[in-house]
Amino acid sequence: MRIKNHPILEFEKGKKIKFTFDGKEYEGYEGDTIASALHAAGVKVLTYSHEKKRPRGFYCAIGNCGQCFMEVNGVSNVRTCIEPLKEGMIVKTQVGKGDIL
């Protein structure tokens, strides 16, 4: 599920790190974003649309669309497509529009 060869980009694999998503432990690599690590692990649904509750997945991957909003370490509305993965992160599917701090 992980892209290894690309005609333009280079992917350097950092050290393996662990994180939790919806109560289950996953592994990714330093240099991954949260969304890319989840995608590589086979997780295709990151959130659901507010009105019709349709599943939303990895879309723009540059932080513009908001299809990847999740709760990370208790903070809502984190754009997981651009948020670097860190050891021990607790990531949860965000329900609704999230809490406004």
Image: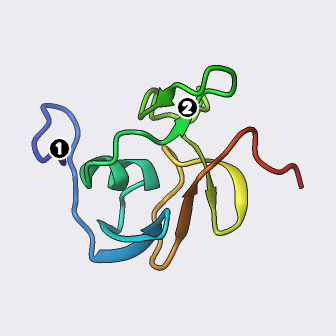
Q: How crowded is mark 1: few (under 14 residues within 10 Å), some or many (20 or more)?
A: few
Q: Please name the amino acid that badge 1 sits on.
A: Ile
Residue 10 against residue 71 in the figure, above or below:
above
- Secondary structure under the numbered disc 1 in the rendered image: loop
Closer-to-camera residue (93/36): 93
Q: Which of 62 and 73 is in front in this view?
A: 73
Badge 2 or badge 1: first in the primary sequence = 1
Q: What residue type is labelled 2?
A: Gln
Q: What residue is at 55 percent from the left and 31 percent from the top?
A: 67
Quadrant that contains the C terminus: bottom right
Asked which quadrant contains residue 48, the reply is: top right
Relative side of 45 to 69, left or right: left
Q: Which residue lies furthest to the front in this view?
A: 52
**What's the residue at 54%, 39% (across, down)?**
47
Q: Sort mark 2 into few (<14), some (14-19) or many (20+) by Cα contacts within 10 Å.
A: many
Closest to the observer: 60 or 5?
60
Residue 2, horizontal then vertical, whole percent: 19, 48
Picture residue at 63% right of the left edge, 48% below the top: 94
Q: Name the residue under label 1.
A: 3
* Residue 67's disc number: 2
Residue at the limit of the structure toward the top, as seen here: 52
From this view, report whether residue 64 is shown above or below residue 68: above
User: Residue 81: percent from the left, percent from the top?
Assistant: 48, 43
The foreground one among 51 and 3 is: 51
Q: How many labels does the image show?
A: 2
Horizontal and vertical percent position of residue 98:
76, 46
Question: With respect to residue 97, does 55 lie above or below?
Answer: above
Q: State how far apart marks 2 and 1 are (Cα).
A: 21 Å
Secondary structure of the residue carrying numbered label 2: loop
